[in-house]
Image (cartoon, helix red, strand yellow):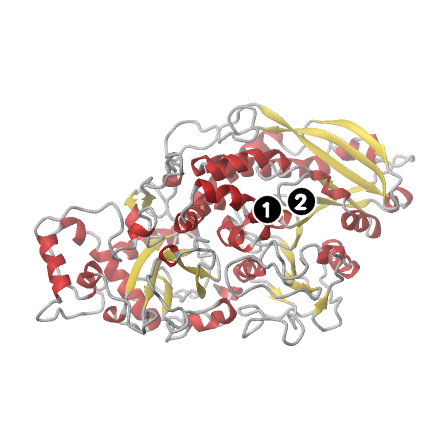
Amino acid sequence: MGRRVVGLVVCAAVAVAACSGGDDDDGAADTTSAVTTATTPETDAPTTTAPAELSADVQARLDELNGGAERPECDYLADGMAAASGCYLPFPSDWFTVTDESTATGKRMALPSTLSNVDGLEVDLTEWNRNDGYSPNTPILLYVPGIDAEASALPTWTDIGASITDTSPVMLVDISSGERIPLWAELDSNADDDADRMLTVRPAISLPEGHSFAVGFRGLVDTSGAAMPVDPDFALYQLGVETTSEWFESRRAEMDATFTALNAGFGVSATELQYAWSFTVASTDNIAGRMLHIRDDALAALGDAAPAFTITSVTPFSDEDIAVQVQGTFTVPNYLTGDGGPGNRFNYASDAVDSLPEQNGTIEAPFMCNISVATMSGTEPAHLVIYGHGLLGSHDEINAGNVRAMSNEHNVVHCATKWAGMSEDDVGNAVATLQNMANFPTMADRLQQGVLNQIFLGRLMTRPGGLVDDGNFKRADGSSLIDTAHLDYDGNSQGGIMGLMLAAVSPDIERVVLGVPGMNYSMLLPRSVDFDDYEAIFEPAYPNDADRVVIIALTQMLWDRGEGAGYVQHVTSNPYPNTPAKTVLMHVAFGDHQVTELSALVEARTMGLTIQRPVAAEGRWQEVEPGWGLESTEYPSDGSAIVVWDSGMAPIPFENHPPREGDDSHEDPRRDPDVRDQKASFLFDDTLVDVCGGEACPADHSP
């Protein structure tokens, strides 16, 4: 992980893989190794001795297997777990993969479609099964009936460091490298019934792409203090008892590799485990390949020029900050079916699993640019910044007071377009999707088209034949109002989430500010008050609490294609081909009701950002070690960093539900002049400065 997590790497002589202790330069090469070690370990698993007599239930299961028991559709390693929700538990599991030598991981997903809504409409997972692994941001789910979380000493988000100690009851090991993966575990506080209450494990970083992982649990007890029983199938693998069942034995190498990795990583023997299995994370190309393809295809046709555009209105403002607003449309290649609007999917060349989207005509995307009073009255050309709007909003968010103030205070021309896929235009499709999750690929695909639209907006802003040559962006003497030599990005909320993805794939943006950001919708949604209205639609369609948790986990496999979580490993380092690495500043709101700070910290650890210390005033921050896994920022800095802004609101709850106490701090950082000063120095002077005087950073609160 390198700088991502300080002191997390425990390099052991893992028989299944060499311990690298760092990021891989060539993901494809490493993923091949990952698959090999996950399926055919080079050395034997830890030796176990079968007892002279098996317990009655284990012996009975052995007799069934030797008698020709059929291969189950569901994963069978934890008795009763499959019945908890649609056959998918424990999740994620390589049980639901098949061998495919054409993929980077050597695997292809083979998830059954076993969940339906109240109308009987099945969640068809055909699109999911195009993947060559699970999400690098996946939650790990299992159902443990009657578990006592406190007595089981589950690692919490307040003490993530405990999860990589030798005594942790929950273990996650990168089979490909031998590294322990930090995490936290929590019971679903949103479930109404214990029978539907999932145990969720959250990796504290985005898992390396193309790698395989071993999951293990030990020492879990129920509310009476009794140890959780071991499933008979699992016991047969643990004890090394061979069977005559071909399908059962086909998994033994994978299970042995799992036991080996957990033993090497945590010193735990197979017989200490109560649950263990392995899973593989999708490859870089599988996650980002469609987005990079449409980007490269569209830009190759465009060349080093601006897209065609039309000015539709020029409006003088009486606002004290903005002098003129220019609106129009620009032409973007369409890679979706139909007219490219909400509800359309990628226009694939064929039904083949490795098919890529093809252009289907063009679309006209809207844009809006604000020219400030300072820019109009000054002599220096303005900085160019793409602005990203919030949840299901619109590009007219650049008219918000804080954005107008930033424009005028720091000589900025902000331009914006809608986040196609998650703009006001997409509300209807979002509602339809919550009622029938088989529709979810339409959202993931259109989000990628939306990022292409943003890239083309950047070309409109900076390339010859674009805004620089339009008379509305010139002074009376003919000089340009805008400096096209540099392009930066600033976005808030959803603009911070999606801005992370744009940063990863944009060939033009240099520096990026992500305001109140996060990533990984499977983590964000249960902890956001914004989801309340949509949960009211989702729950009647899928009334079982456990089903909804599983569905949200499954959707992350496609969310990764169209949100920042799937691209976070390629922003500040390990960039995609023909894409520069970016310098990133994250501004987080303490106690945010809408975008949990926990997801921002996962994002920051993954990118190797430094953090402002003190993170918060004494007694305010809930972590045992504030900013765990992140080095301190040394000012002035020319690198990437995360800063927490505290406007005095209540801390987030310990459980996985939204903060609701008191006022929301979500919009406080962007409204504070000190925040804007720090952003301006970072974006335009290439220097991150301390505007908090060496103390925790306060922000003004505006109810």
Q: Is residue 12 above or below residue 516?
A: below
Q: Which residue is mark 2?
A: 388
Distance (Cα) linking label 2 and label 1 = 8 Å
Q: Is residue 265 above or below residue 128?
A: below
Under circle 1, the secondary element is helix
Q: Nearer the viewer, residue 7 or 449?
A: 449
Q: Amino acid at mark 1?
A: Met
Instruction: Tell me the quarter of the image containing the C terminus.
Output: bottom right
Q: Is residue 357 visible?
A: yes
Q: Is residue 293 visible?
A: no
Residue 672 numbered mark, or none: none
Q: Amino acid at mark 2?
A: Gly
At x 53%, y 53%, the residue is: 524
Under circle 2, the secondary element is strand
Q: Which residue is mark 1?
A: 498
Q: Quadrant of residue 615?
A: bottom right
Q: Is residue 244 left or right of residue 659?
A: left
Q: Is residue 340 left or right of residue 85?
A: right
